[in-house]
C-alpha cells in the first residue's frame, strides 16, 4: 500500500524575524507565575496548619478558663461556708464570754442556800441588746424570807443591783423575780 502524497500547506513564512522574540525579562513571566502558584500553595498550607493550632489553643484556653471559673466558684463557696462557721464560732465565743459573768452569780446563789432551803427553779435571761441586765426568776422551797435576804445580799456583793423586785410567799414556796443590773464600781 502506498501512501498517496498529499500536499501539506505550511503556513510558516519563510521570512525570518517577522515578530521579534520576547525580551529576556518577559521570559521570566511564566516562571514567576509558576513560582507564585507554588508560594500560594505553601502559604495556604502554612495558614491551614497555623489556623488549626490557633483553634486548638483557643479550645485549650476555653477549657482552662472554665476550669478556673469552676475553681473560683468552689473557692467562693468554701469561703462563704468558712465565714459562716467563723460567725457561728464567734457567736458561741461571745455567748460563752457573756455567760462568764453569770457563773459567779449562779455560784453565789447556790452557796447562799441554807440547809433547810432548796432551789426549785432558777431562771436567768439576758437580752442581746442590753447584756448588762439580767432578768432573774427564783423559786425556793423555804418557809422564811431570811433565806431570800441572804441570797439578795450575796447577789449585791457581786455588784448587781435588783431593779423592780417582786416576791411571793405561799405554801412553803418563795418566788422572787427581779431585773439585776450590773453596777460598775467608781
Image (cartoon, rainbow, N blue to C red):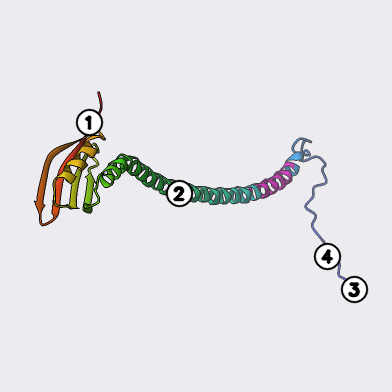
Where is residue 75 shown, x and y percent of the image?
47, 47
Instruction: First in sequence, mark 2 or 1: give its number.
Output: 2
**In-front residue for pair 111/177:** 111
In this picture, residue 72 sits left or right of residue 145:
right
Residue 34 visible here: yes
Where is residue 185 shown, x and y percent of the image?
25, 26
Name the residue rendered at 90%, 73% in the picture: 2
Name the residue rendered at 12%, 41% in the picture: 165
Q: Are marks 4 and 1 in contact (CB under 8 Å)?
A: no
Instruction: First in sequence, mark 4 or 1: give its number.
Output: 4
Q: Distance between the residues labelled 2 and 1?
A: 44 Å
Residue 31 is one of the magenta-drawn residues: no
Q: Report the disc number at residue 183.
A: 1
Given this view, does label 3 or label 1 mark the residue nearer the observer? Answer: 1
- Element under disc 3: loop
- Label 2: which residue? 78
- Element under disc 2: helix
Q: Distance between the residues labelled 3 and 2?
A: 106 Å
Q: Quadrant of the N terminus?
A: bottom right
Q: How far apart are marks 3 and 1 (CA)?
A: 149 Å
Instruction: First in sequence, mark 3 or 2: give its number.
Output: 3
Q: Which residue lies furthest to the front in this view?
A: 115
Q: Report the disc number at residue 132.
A: none
**In-front residue for pair 100/109:** 109
- Label 4: which residue? 6
Instruction: First in sequence, mark 2 or 4: give its number.
Output: 4
Which region shows up in magenta? 32-47
Amino acid at each position: 500500500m502506498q501512501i498517496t502524497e498529499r500536499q501539506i500547506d505550511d503556513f510558516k513564512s519563510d521570512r525570518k524575524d517577522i515578530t521579534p522574540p520576547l525580551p529576556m525579562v518577559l521570559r521570566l513571566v511564566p516562571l514567576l507565575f509558576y513560582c507564585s502558584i507554588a508560594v500560594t500553595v505553601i502559604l495556604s498550607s502554612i495558614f491551614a496548619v497555623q489556623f488549626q493550632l490557633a483553634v486548638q489553643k483557643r479550645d485549650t484556653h476555653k477549657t482552662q478558663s472554665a476550669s478556673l471559673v469552676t475553681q473560683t466558684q468552689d473557692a467562693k463557696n468554701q469561703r462563704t461556708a468558712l465565714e459562716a462557721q467563723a460567725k457561728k464560732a464567734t457567736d458561741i465565743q461571745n455567748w460563752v464570754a457573756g455567760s462568764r459573768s453569770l457563773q459567779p452569780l449562779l455560784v453565789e446563789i447556790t452557796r447562799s442556800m441554807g440547809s433547810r432551803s432548796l432551789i426549785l427553779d432558777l431562771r436567768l435571761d439576758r437580752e442581746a441588746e442590753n447584756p448588762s441586765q439580767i432578768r432573774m426568776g427564783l423559786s425556793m422551797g423555804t418557809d422564811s424570807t431570811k433565806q431570800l435576804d441572804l441570797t439578795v445580799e450575796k447577789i449585791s456583793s457581786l455588784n448587781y443591783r435588783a431593779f423592780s423586785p417582786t416576791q411571793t410567799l405561799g405554801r412553803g414556796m418563795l418566788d422572787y423575780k427581779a431585773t439585776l443590773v450590773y453596777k460598775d464600781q467608781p
